[in-house]
Image (cartoon, helix red, strand yellow):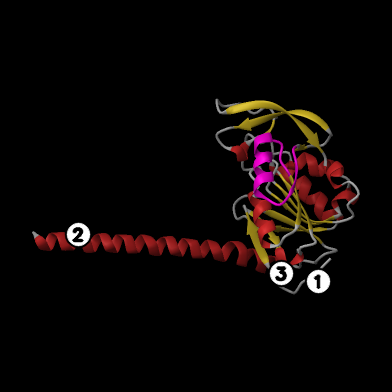
Amino acid sequence: MLEVGVWPKISRIEGHTFFSNLLTGDSIVFDLGANKGGFSYELSRQIGCSIVAVEPTPDLAVQISLRAEATVVTAAISTSVGTAAFIVDRGNSEASRMQMGAQQAHSHETIAVETTTLEALFQDREYIDLVKMDIEGAEVDVIVAAAEDLLLRIGQLSIEFHDFDQTSGVTASGVNKVVDKLTKIGFSKLKFSYWTNGDVLFINRRLMRIGVIRRNFLFISAVVLPGILRTAYRSYDSAITKLEGLKLFRKQNNKL
């Protein structure tokens, strides 16, 4: 494990925020719900970690193997090893998920996929530097079912909770169960999404302790300030557009 300074380096890839100065070329990273491999590709390009990309959709798994330097596992993350029905959304690959009673649209196709667990994936690995989890609603059941000693092998755990999606089956109480479990066993929670729980980082306190001051600073620097800057830029751009339009209007009137 690495020592970090007072203010760790924040990085965000594909909507997942983590501390990149805790990673090196020797780090082990699991990309759970890898989709087309964007996270794996960019992390490999930036740091050169050893990456295991897990994606249940077969054609996407092939794309990952062609795109990223990663070991690809074609399976869905679940609470048991076996097979399960999986809804593939051909219109939006990021919305494909385990079948959980959601209504299917015309762009949906149900296929059978292999399922695996965190325990089966991690096997005898003593330490995993970073786990990125974007598994479309299965995150609550998977974390709640996982053994505490297994979770404590993880240094950083970045989760996209899908409580913002009513079809996912994830509720606020489910998110709270995960947060309560992880914080009780030794993780600190850092929320990097403003309105939702779409970008939440849990960091093992054995790796780094996060006090209230540091937590607030990280949230302000990673979420609040960029939001203010984006709003200011949009306002400035809108004002310039209106000014140019006014100039053009006056120019045309002067010609009349």
Residue 249's label in the rendered image is 2
Q: Is residue 59 magenta?
A: yes
Residue plotted at (22% across, 64% down): 247
The furthest residue to the front: 66
Q: Amino acid at mark 1?
A: Glu
Q: Which quadrant of the view contains residue 85?
A: top right
Residue at the spot of label 1: 3
Out of 1 and 165, give the one closest to the viewer: 1
User: Which circle, 1 or 2, is nearer the viewer?
Assistant: 1
Quarter of the image that includes the N terminus: bottom right
The location of residue 96, given as percent across then percent down, is 64, 35
Out of 91 and 175, give the one closest to the viewer: 91
In this picture, which residue range is highlighted in magenta?
54-74
Q: Which quadrant of the view contains residue 42?
A: bottom right
Q: Find the distance from the CA under tag 3 to the CA under tag 1.
A: 10 Å
Mark 1 / mark 2, whichever is N-terminal: 1
Out of 37 and 251, give the one closest to the viewer: 37
Residue plotted at (67% across, 39% down): 62
Q: Amino acid at mark 2?
A: Phe
